[in-house]
Image (spheres, rainbow, N blue to C red):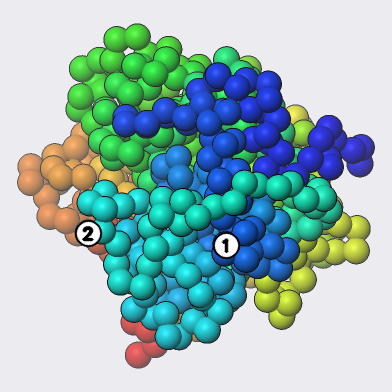
Amino acid sequence: MRDFPHGDLPVDGLLRRAARRHPEGVAVRTTTRTLRFAELDAYTDRIAGWLGGTAGAGPGTRVGVAHVLAPEFAAAYHGVIRAGATVVLINPLTAQEGLRHVLAAGRVEIALVPSATAPLITAIRHELPSLRAVVVTDTPDGAVPDGTVPLHAALDQARPWQAGPPPDPGAVACVQFTTGTTGAPKGVLLTHRNLVANARQTALAHGLSADSVTLNHLPLYHVMHLNSALYAGACQVLCQDPDPMVSLTAAADAGATHYYGLPARLHALAADERLARGIPRGLRLSAVLSGGAALRPQAARTLRQRLRVPVIQGYGMAELSPLTHCQRPDRYRPGTVGTVVADTECRLVDLTTGRPVQPWSTGEVQIRGPQLMAGYLDEGQPDRIDADGWFATGDVGYADDEGNLRLVDRLTDVFTYDNEIVSPSRVEQILADDPRVADCVVADWPDPEHGALVWAGIVLHPGAGAHPHTPAAAPRHVGILDVLDAVTERANERLSPFERIRVTEAIDAVPRTRTGKTERRAVRQRLKTRAAP
C-alpha cells in the first residue's frame, strides 16, 4: 500500500497548518460565537499550556473530553493532544453508569465536561481513583458544581505553551469508545497516523475545500467532521437547535455547501410538513451527508426530491477512525454506502470458509488501510486483525462490479432457518417499502424444529387500515391484526421461503440508540425469554 501525504503530521498539526494557511478564515461558528483559525489555534495553545504546566499533563496522561457541539470541544481536543496527553472521548449524553465505565476503563485523570455532566461525575468520584480534576467547559451562570473548576479560571493560570518534540505518528492520540450495542463499550486506540489519514480521506471523499462551509446538525461533535474540515481549511457551522427546519434556515444563512446529519434527524426532516411547503431562500447545498446508521430509503428519496441535492451515505466504525466507504455525488448508487475512500482496501469473505468472494456474493466485510486502529484499550478483547492487516468488521454485505458496498447485516444479527442464512435487515427493507409501515424490526424467534423463525415487530402508520394496499374484501375499518396479516402477506410474496415472516406483532416503537441504530440485541433477548416457555 502506498504512503499518503502528511503521514508524519500530528493531529493538532491539522489545526496549526490551517491557522498558518487561513489565519482569518472562519474555523467554527455558532449563533453566538465565531472563531477564526488563528483564534482557535491560540485558544488551543492556552489549553495545552495549562494542561502541560499547572495540570501536569503529558505523555501517558489520559484526559477525558466531552464532545459537545461547541467550539470548546475543538480547542480542548487539540489542546490535550498538543500537550502530549491522550484524549479519551466522553459522550455527555451518557447515563452515569456509562460515564463510570468510560472514566474507569480509560483511567482518566482530568475530565473536561459541560456543567450538565459534571455533577454526575462528582457523585461517583470516590469510585474513580485516577480522576484528580473535573473542569467545567461551560459556565452559563458563572457557577460550577462543588469539587469542579471552571475552564476560564483554569486558563487564567496557564503558562505560555512551549512546543516539545513532535510525537511519534504511531503514538496513541485518542481513545474512542464504541457504541456498545453488542456489549460493554470497547476503548479503541487511535494513533496520530490513523486520525490524520482519515481526515484526508474524509475531506477527499466529501469534496471539502477551503471554500466549503459545513453545517453540523448533530447532537454531538464528531472528530471526523472536526479533523476533515481542518484538513481542508473549511468553515464549520454548529447548529445546536434540534429543529430540522431551523437547521435548514441556518444552512441557508451560512451559505453552507455540506449538511451533516444523523439518520434519526434526517428522518424527522423528511417527514416534516414544513419541508413539503418549500425550502429556505438562498439554500445552496451541494450534498446532504448521513452516517452512524442506515438512512431509510424513503427518507433519502424525499430529501433528494425536496432539496434537489444528492443524499450521501457513508460507512465506517470507531476502529477505522471511522470512515472507510462513501457515496460520491457523481457516482451515486442508491442503497449502497459507496466505494472505499483513498488508500483503503475492502474485501468480502465467505461466512463459512473465510475465503474472498466475487462481486455480488454475500460475505463479511474486511478492511485494510492507514486508518485502522492500533488495537483495543483492553488487551483481552478478541484480535480482529489478521496477519496480513485485514480487519474483520463483523458486518455482512456484498459489492457490485464497481466496488459499491451494500450492507446486509451484522454478523451477530444474521440467523439460520433450516441452515439458510436469514438477514433481518433485508426483511426490514422489504417491510419498509409498504406504505402502511412506519417502522419495523426483524429478529429470530427461537424454534426447536427450524432453529429460528422470522419475527417482525411492526409500527403501523395511523389509518393504515384504510390504505389502498389493504385487501378489497376487508371491511372499511379493519382491525390491527387484519392489517398486520395483509402487510405480512405482501412482504412474504417478495421473500424467499426461508426468509418469510412467521410471527408478526404490532409494536409502538422500535428500540433505537441515540444515533438511530436498532437495538436488536435487546429485542432478541426479549424474544428468547418469551419463547422459552
Mark 2 crowdedness (10 Å alpha carbons): few <14, some 14-19, many ≥20: few
Specify the quadrant of the image occupied by residue 403. top right
154 or 266: nearer the eye?
Answer: 154
The picture quadrant where one finds residue 512 is: bottom left
Q: Which mark is residue 508?
A: 2
Q: Position of residue 114 (x, y in %)?
A: 37, 56
Residue occupying the far top of the picture: 282
Q: Which mark is residue 303?
A: none
Task: Specify the quadrant that holds the C terminus.
Answer: bottom left
Q: What type is the residue that disc 1 sits on?
A: Thr
Could one spot residue 422 in this view of the protein? Answer: no
Q: Residue at x 56, y 46 (%)?
A: 46
Q: Residue at x 85, y 64 (%)?
A: 386
Position of residue 370 relative to residue 40, above or below, is below
* 34 sits to left or right of 499: left
Who comes first in sequence, dot 2 or dot 1? 1
Q: Residue at x 37, y 31 (%)?
A: 33
Of residue 283 and residue 77, the one placed in the foreground of this image is 77
Q: Are marks 2 and 1 in contact (CB under 8 Å)?
A: no
Q: Nearer the viewer, residue 189 or 138?
A: 138
- Residue 491's place in the image compared with 175, above or below, is above
Residue type beneath disc 2: Asp
Q: How many marks?
A: 2
- In the picture of the structure, the residue carrying the numbered disc 1 is 54
The residue that appears at 30% across and 62% down in the rendered structure is 144
Picture coordinates of residue 14 (x, y %)?
68, 36
Image location (x, y in percent) of residue 252:
35, 16
Secondary structure beneath label 1: loop
Q: Is residue 20 above or below residue 423?
A: above
